[in-house]
Amino acid sequence: MNKTILITAGFLGITAVVLGALGAHALAEKLPPAALKSFSTGVEYQMFHALFLLFLGSTDKLLIKHKKAIFWLIFAGVICFSFSIYGLSTQPLSGLQLGSIALVTPLGGLFMISGWALLIYRVFRSLT
């Protein structure tokens, strides 16, 4: 499981860098400032959680079953949160009507919050 977590962290990290560069260079003059800011928010959260997964895959303080649950919450959260933001913020370029996926964004946030909360709970439980 640690290998899967670390590979996923690497994948999310590299795609965050690529998407960040895309946003800063290719999209900077093509998107309105508010859409570009939203796109950047998606990149930031993706990178923060890639780093989170690097930590998770590297620690030996948690049982594998707990790591697995935290991993899936964080991974689902990044996919729902960041990738829905990418889709929504690039609508002016794609011409796609993606308004319905806006409901996925807060669900992704809830998954990420749950992953952090589960980490805190499991670490707290292991110390008592």
Image (cartoon, rainbow, N blue to C red):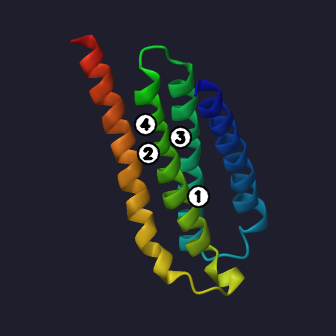
Q: CA–CA distance between discs 1 and 3?
A: 12 Å
SS at mark 2 in the image: helix
Which residue carries the number 4 mark? 70
Image quadrant holding the N terminus, namely top right
SS at mark 4 in the image: helix
Q: How many labels does the image show?
A: 4
Q: Disc 1 marks which amino acid? A: Ser
Q: State if disc 4 and disc 2 touch (CB < 8 Å).
A: yes
Q: Where 12 sits versus 103, above or below? A: above
Quadrant of the rendered image containing residue 54: top right
* Sequence-earlier tag: 1 or 3: 1
Residue at 48% from the left image edge and 43% from the top image edge: 72
Using the image as rendered, state which of residue 11 and residue 3 is in the foreground: 3
Quadrant of the rendered image containing residue 117: top left
Q: CA–CA distance between discs 1 and 4?
A: 25 Å
SS at mark 1 in the image: helix
From the viewer's perspective, is 49 left or right of 7?
Answer: left
Select label 1 or label 3 by which is in front.
Answer: 3
Mark 2 surroundings: few (<14), some (14-19) or many (≥20) residues within 10 A = many
* Sequence-earlier tag: 3 or 4: 3
Q: CA–CA distance between discs 2 and 4?
A: 5 Å
Indicate the position of residue 19 as horizontal and vertical percent values: 71, 56
Indicate the position of residue 6 as horizontal and vertical percent values: 64, 30
Select label 3 or label 4 by which is in front.
Answer: 4
Which disc is residue 48 wearing?
A: 3
Which residue carries the number 2 mark? 73
Q: CA–CA distance between discs 3 and 4?
A: 15 Å
Q: Disc 2 marks which amino acid? A: Leu
Mark 3 surroundings: few (<14), some (14-19) or many (≥20) residues within 10 A = some
Which residue carries the number 1 mark? 40
